[in-house]
Image (cartoon, helix red, strand yellow):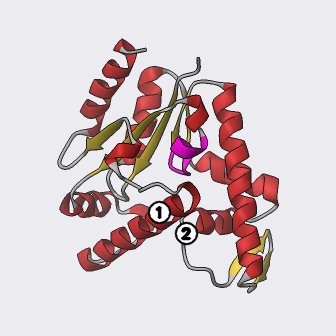
């Protein structure tokens, strides 16, 4: 049976890094933002629009198709959200059927429930996540600590709503995962070595 590992994560917890390093340590495929690109191709929607839907950000004036922008709201937005989720569902299942892999986010733990994936959730203290975001300085943003804190809380809230809407489960709830990893002030590379060893011993 294929080895499928899903990684849910709080924003700024280092979950993406943990997932990537874990895939490298186990010698299996890693999927994250590639899923957004595939959804965009299959739905003919722009990657930015797909990303906004998957991250459950507020609807507004978004590029619906490549090179075009519309301000549709209401029923049209709901239809688009559903089409993106269906494409996401199909793509994630195809990836899991193709080979052993680590998949980050995107409700993969729920979508692949029939594959019995090993489900990981990565979390950390707010202070630790703020420090990680500052040191990473992603997207060249020059945000204050207060703004970063607000961003972390907003993204976590959006991810939680998205997950609960499509799965009916509690995002981050320990009962929904096989392993919860606290990365507060931790060396993720060292954590991954331990997780990889545990998974290899129980394979």
Occupied quadrant, residue 71: bottom right
- The residue at 58%/50% (across/down) is 33
- Residue 99: in magenta span: no
- Note whether 43 is above or below 192 in the view shown: below
- In terms of depth relative to the viewer, which is nearer, 131 or 42? 42
Q: Residue 36: x, y in percent?
A: 65, 53
- The residue at 74%/52% (across/down) is 87
- The residue at 64%/84% (across/down) is 60
Q: Residue 121: x, y in percent?
A: 37, 45
Mark 1 to mark 2 CA distance (whole Å): 6 Å
- Note whether 132 is above or below 177 in the view shown: below
Question: How dense is the environment of label 2, judged by Cα within 10 Å: few (below 14), some, or many (20 and up)?
Answer: some
- Note whether 199 is above or below 147 in the view shown: above
Secondary structure beneath label 1: helix
Q: Residue 193: x, y in percent?
A: 30, 25
Drawn side of residue 3 relative to residue 188, left or right: right
Q: Say which quadrant the C terminus sits in.
A: top left
Give the residue pinned by disc 1.
159
Give the residue pinned by disc 2.
56
Secondary structure beneath label 2: loop
Give the residues drawn in magenta, as a range.
104-111
Q: Say which quadrant the N terminus sits in.
A: top right
């Amino acid at each position: 049976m294929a080895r499928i590992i899903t990684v849910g994560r709080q924003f700024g917890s280092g979950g993406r890094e943990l997932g990537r390093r874990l895939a490298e340590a186990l010698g299996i495929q890693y999927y994250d933002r590639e899923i957004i690109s595939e959804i965009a191709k299959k739905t003919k929607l722009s990657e930015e629009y797909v990303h906004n839907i998957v991250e459950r950000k507020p609807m507004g004036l978004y590029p619906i198709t490549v090179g075009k922008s519309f301000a549709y709201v209401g029923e049209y937005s709901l239809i688009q959200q559903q089409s993106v989720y269906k494409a996401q569902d199909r793509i994630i299942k195809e990836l899991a059927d193709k080979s052993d892999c680590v998949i980050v986010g995107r409700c993969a733990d729920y979508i692949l429930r029939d594959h019995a994936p090993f489900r990981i959730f990565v979390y950390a203290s707010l202070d630790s996540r703020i420090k990680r975001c500052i040191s990473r300085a992603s997207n060249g943003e020059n945000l204050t600590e207060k703004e970063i804190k607000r961003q972390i809380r907003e993204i976590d809230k959006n991810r939680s709503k998205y997950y609960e809407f499509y799965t009916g489960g509690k995002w981050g709830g320990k009962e929904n995962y096989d392993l919860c990893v606290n990365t507060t002030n931790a060396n993720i590379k060292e954590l991954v070595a331990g997780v990889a060893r545990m998974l290899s011993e129980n394979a």
